[in-house]
Amino acid sequence: MSKEEKKVNRRDFLFTASYTVGAVGLGAVIWPMIDQMNPDKAQQALATTEVDISNIEPGKSITVLWRGKPVFLKRRTPEEIAEARAVNMDDLPDPQMDEERVKEGKDEWLVMLGVCTHLGCVPLKDKGDFNGWFCPCHGSHYDVSGRIRKGPAPTNMEIPKFEFVDSNTIKIG
Amino acid sequence: MSEHEYTPKSKAGKWFNDRLPLLTLGAHLTDYPTPKNLNYWWTFGGILTFCLITQIVTGIVLAMHYVAHADLAFASVEHIMRDVNYGWLIRYIHSNGASMFFLAVYIHIFRSLFYGSYKSPREVIWIIGLMIYLLMMAAAFMGYVLPWGQMSFWGATVITNLFSAIPLVGDSITTWLWGAYSVDNPTLNRFFSLHYLIPFLILGLVVLHIWALHVPGNNNPVGIDIKKPSKDTVPFHPYITIKDAFALLVFMIIFAGFVFFTPNVLGHSDNYIPANPLVTPAHIVPEWYLLPFYAILRSVPDKLGGVILMFSAIFILFVLPWLDTSKVRSAVFRPIYRQFFWILVIDVLMLGYVGAMPAEGIYLVLARVGTIYYFLHFIVVMPVVGYLEKTDPIPMSISEPVLTGGAEPSLARKVNDKV
């Protein structure tokens, strides 16, 4: 009797060990099949864009493409900056100071992803109830700092990593 | 499954059938005992099979001329429309075919809801059917992206961004789906690959759907269990095949009407503008067959909440056989449920309508009311009505009320009577 039990245990061990090795092997094969769908090296190589900003007048903005997405570069007027900074934090669904959204000393330059944080449409400039952007897809209103004020979008428009290479050039990414 | 043993007449047939019983399968499908009272709502299974085959055949042909590249896709579709011999016809059949496919599947699903075809013992047929429906939506969505017009691009952007609502891993999943940092060439490429794959997955599920159907046999308009074969049944061929063929002909006339007279009426004109990642069209709408779900998505003022509710609207159907507590299948004998059924039909049509309208004012109110009713119908109405409702007497068999020319009380039976 005890001899038979022993045999069964030995077989159980072999089964479990085989399944485990099989599962590890399967995982090792499945991972490359999943990971191949992530952005490839060519996509990653396009990850920075340099923009000449010398021609942008105060109050105007341009849109450039960075990693397939639009980036808004807006040179704000002093009035617009003042308006953005006068907002009560309690009125913001995603509270964030305007100062946190721009580079210190370069307050007039708002550089942000022109992508609605709801479902990814491109908001229209100088539209909406808050003198900023309005997304036509599902009705999100953003203010002059690109912060969400009204509508289904959960967060403010994203500020990408960027830096001033010199006074006329911004590098995004 | 087959009620009798089949033996091929010819020697060669017998030789082959002993090795692979395909002829037995053929005989089963031909003789398959079918309730004799099936009405025209039962012809949509055959119509759907026709739709699937049409999409596969036209799709394979289109893939011979289409180029799945962000720079070339739009032009290659125009090339199909203008240069390829009969390309316009094949593409219009394929694009309108998707709409006809959904039209038929919605009738098929509501047929099931009315006559209780999802109930025991047919739950597995129902669930496989819903899996087919889900795959159909995935295939239709990816197919709509392939022409790489403005609606293609922005539809793809909005739908893939639904996944970004998932907490923590949402953005990684979205990037993984795209294969880039936005909807781009890699996205188009993989959508084409999957769009080609999914119809064959559907074909496999259709085989399982029919197999699961042939175990208990068809439900029928009076919804009672019947003995097979008996005087309540007829062989599938020629009785059902001829009825299916007639319905299919009528369906094809409507189909051809769209293809030849208004081939673009169900599409959106913005999709004849090449994709532009810098400009979102003023008014993004999905194809008509997804509008009710789009209305549900937009009725919630919260991103994650809207996405969850939209997916729930589909997944709640999977547990429907267990939400419905009524022992009577057919709504013909359920006076209360029958009324709620029609309210649901109107509700879904209304959600479809408001889904096409801007999400503001009265449309938003209607979308919210419609969404609330949609869920109430399944979560509250179905269990409660099934429990409280006094159903009408159901007949003993299909033949008896027909042959005696009326609902004789002596021929009626109570719900709990054994057949």
Image (cartoon, coloured by chain):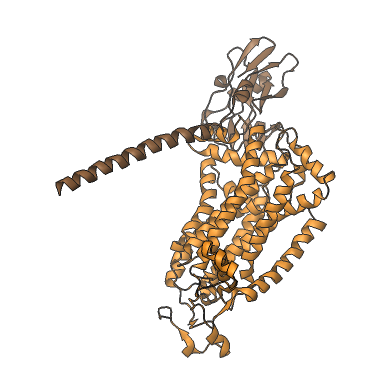
Chain colours: A brown, B orange
Q: Quadrant of the C terminus of chain A?
A: top right
**Residue B409 spot, x, y in % from top left:** 48, 89
- In depth, the one of A146 and B126 nearer the eye is B126
Q: Residue at x 52, y 29 (%)?
A: A95
Q: Residue at x 63, y 58 (%)?
A: B350
- In depth, the one of B236 and B284 nearer the eye is B236
**Residue A2 spot, x, y in % from top left:** 15, 46
Q: Residue at x 58, y 19 (%)?
A: A161
| Residue ranking furthest to the front | B11
Instruction: Tell me which corner region of the image, top left, top right, bottom left or bottom right, holds residue A52.
Output: top right
Residue B256 located left or right of residue A38: right
The image shows residue B2, relative to residue A147, as above or below, that is: below
- In depth, the one of B237 and A84 nearer the eye is B237
Q: Residue at x 23, y 43 (%)?
A: A9
**Residue A16 spot, x, y in % from top left:** 31, 40
**Residue B343 spot, x, y in % from top left:** 58, 65
Instruction: Tell me which corner region of the image, top left, top right, bottom left or bottom right, holds residue A150.
Output: top right
Residue B385 located left or right of residue B104: left
The image shows residue A2, relative to residue A170, as above or below, that is: below
- Residue B368 visible in the current orientation: no
The image shows residue B105, relative to residue A169, as above or below, that is: below
| Residue ranking furthest to the top | A166
- Residue B406 visible in the current orientation: yes
Residue A36 located left or right of residue B94: left
- In depth, the one of A21 and B164 nearer the eye is A21
The image shows residue B191, relative to residue A143, as above or below, that is: below
